[in-house]
Amino acid sequence: MRFGERLCALAFAALVCIPIAPAADEEDDDIIMLEEIMVTARKREQRSFEVPLSVSTLRGEKADTLRSSGLDIRYLSNRTPSLQMESSFGRVFPRFYIRGLGNTDFDLNASQPVSVLYDGVVLENALLKGFPAFDLDRIEVLRGPQGTLFGRNTPAGAVKFESARPTQEFEGYGRFSYGRHSTSNFEAAVSGALIPSVLSTRISLLDQRRDDWIDNAHTDEDNALGRHRDFAGRIQLLWTPSPELKTWVKFHLRDLDGTARLFRANTLVQGQGDLVDDFARDRISHDGRNEQTLNSQGLAAEVRYNMGNFQLVSLTGLERLTMFARGDIDGGYGAVFSPPSGPGEIPFSSETASGIPKLHQFSQEVRLVSIAPYRLAYQFGLYFFREFVEMEDFNYNTLAGGTDDGKVRQEQEVTARAAFAAMTYQWNKDLELGAGLRLSNDSKDYTAWRDTSPAVTEAGPIGPIHQNPQGTVWSGDLSLRYRVSPSAQTYLRTARGFRAPSIQGRLLFGNEVTVADTETILSFEGGTKLRLWEQRMHLNMAAFHYFMQDQQLTAVGGEANFNRLVNAGSTIGRGVEAELTLAPITAIEVKAGLSYNHTRIDDPHLAVQGCGAPCTMLDPPGSVDGTYSINGNSLPQAPGWIADAALRYALALPGGAHLIASTDWAYRSRVRFFLYESAEFGDDWLLEGGLRLACLLPFADMEVAIVGRNILNDTSPTGGIDFNNLTSYVNETRFWGMEVVRRF
């Protein structure tokens, strides 16, 4: 008997070593019409149906269709229940919100309560989270605190991207599309054996391009802005020298050059918040420069070694990144004291840039996982994370030709350590109990300097300013899953999560570094998962209620381009989620999702600055002049309703060809952009639809399609700048194009 087996017998005896019946009858598998997707929401492969958690998956044709216009990772926004996304940085720095919880902070070291993992490796910095999604096996959206297995910075949930892995069989595909604004997207992958049964590889490439298509009315330059060139690649090796050992290695990179986020001055109607009547996507009036570059590389390695009834897993991740982005923040030209100026009133010019000269991230996880089919399944693990990042912020004097007018430097080193354990016990074939616990220690070593200040502030150099917040926190979860029948599961789950302390040091226009203490969340969730009508209908439903203490909030703007971190006394959230997949006949498939989220800040003493722009404040005044109470407000970028629906119809044609028509729609209700409530800085609703008409040619394994995204050309503001004028930025424009796919 091996050491692991002997330890199992001594420690768990009969409790562990009693085999259990399978969760579903074998005969049920013969009539499955809808695929039951395997997920790794609990760091082991399981059917999504059997996971006591609100989890969504996107894969295959639906995921490919959603990103057919070349949109960055924000194509996921509102495409599953309770998931909202936006960005004030364009194609980089996506901000995720799950169940209303997110972070509107735009500083380069901002932390988010939604964790993003690519092939199991956490991508901590928001710029890393924007790595393109391509050649994927699936995307998993885990809602609710994930404090046991995924740990730090997951009080809202986690989004997991899983790459398609190397295969021994030779296979691959190529995908090319071309459409509006000279937008081209090329994606390809090839996979196969280098040494039969021992070593395989997979190479994946993505190249996305768009020409300038937005005119600059101020300079009378046609097609001056809007371009991007975004390239990403991935090489994987899978080495399986024996049945006991499996080693996987991945190298990936990204290189982006293009237009940063375009801010548009005075595009919101004062007192209403609607876009002005003469708003035009293809026209802007800027007098500042706009540019954005990003370069990143990463390496991941996973080793799995079977030791009898156990598996030892090691996962290592390395990430490097550099970035620079510069933009015209006031969204217009000139200033009221330096005419001509416009559009509308520009109180003062604002042109800034942010960059990361160096970002290094290292993570290491080791787990011991049970793999035998016993009543007790468990895993124990240790986790280590370290990140070092250098950041720079610049201000420019636009009225003097864009000369340097201020510089701030920041450095931050983050160290996190954790130990965790998770177990599930199968009481009988119908009842499963689960529990997990994680102990985490986080520390940040932060320093900031202001080398030069903008002339308008008359402040001068400052620093170094040091901050070193740290803390030790426990998180975990308890769950109960009951199989009512082979086609019906119900579950209860309670979970505790946390987010480590955050630091904000935007010193160009302020003199203080603010720190937000650790936030914690306690969540209660119940759900039911049904597989009905001989597996032609999948229905998942969940209801939740959470209580958050010391939530970290970002008070953006005010009368200066400055951020402040604050802690809210408590925040309350509740809601429901539902997902439906239906295949009434072989030719038709319907997918739909719906969620309702209610959030409320509960802190009668918390007040923030109002906007510096001429907006209409709706909150009551705070105790300090110029501040407004946000007690009772919902969270920013937290829509009450999110709904999505997709319909696919396949028609057989002569000769074995098929015509496939599909349409998809996503809706979100009103969002506010900031912590305070104003008449202007928000959007009532957004509705985006897509269309795809494809012909499958079996003799060539080829697919030719017409694709359309945002086909109704919904034009909605998705964020704003509140310290200067009624500035906004909007969602992606309508896209039409042709696509060709070749598989082999």
Image (cartoon, rainbow, N blue to C red):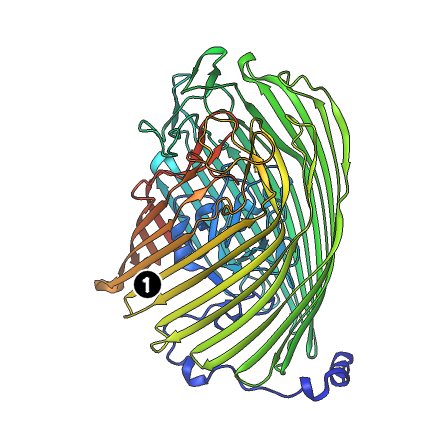
Nearer the observer, 521 or 661: 521
Query: Badge 1: how crowded within 10 Å, few (<14), some, or many (20+)?
Result: some
SS type, badge 1: strand
Q: State which quadrant residue 268 falls in.
A: top left
> Where residue 324 sits: x, y (%)?
59, 32
Q: Position of residue 528 (x, y in %)?
A: 45, 72
- Seen as rendered, the residue at the extreme front is 623
Work out which quarter of the rendered image holds the N terminus and state it: bottom right
Q: Is residue 291 left or right of residue 178?
A: right
Residue 531 image-quadrant placement: bottom left
- Drawn side of residue 339 relative to residue 734, left or right: right
Q: Which residue is mark 1?
A: 590
Quarter where residue 446 is shown: top right
The residue sitting at the left extreme is 654
Q: Is residue 473 visible?
A: yes
On the image, the x and y values in percent for residue 648 come to 30, 60
Residue 63 in the image: above or below residue 325: below
Q: Is residue 722 above or below residue 647?
A: above
Residue 335 % position (x, y): 49, 15
Give the number of callouts. Answer: 1
Along the viewing direction, whichever of 562 and 434 lies nearer the viewer: 562
- Amino acid at the residue labelled 1: Val
Q: Can residue 322 be seen in this snapshot?
A: no
Q: Is residue 66 above or below residue 329?
A: below
Q: Is residue 352 left or right of residue 308?
A: left
Tell me if residue 596 comes above or below residue 494 in the rendering: above
In the displayed structure, does residue 494 sit left or right of residue 437?
A: left
Residue sitting at x 44%, y 61%? 577
Point 51% across, 60% down: residue? 140
Image quadrant in which the C terminus is located: bottom left
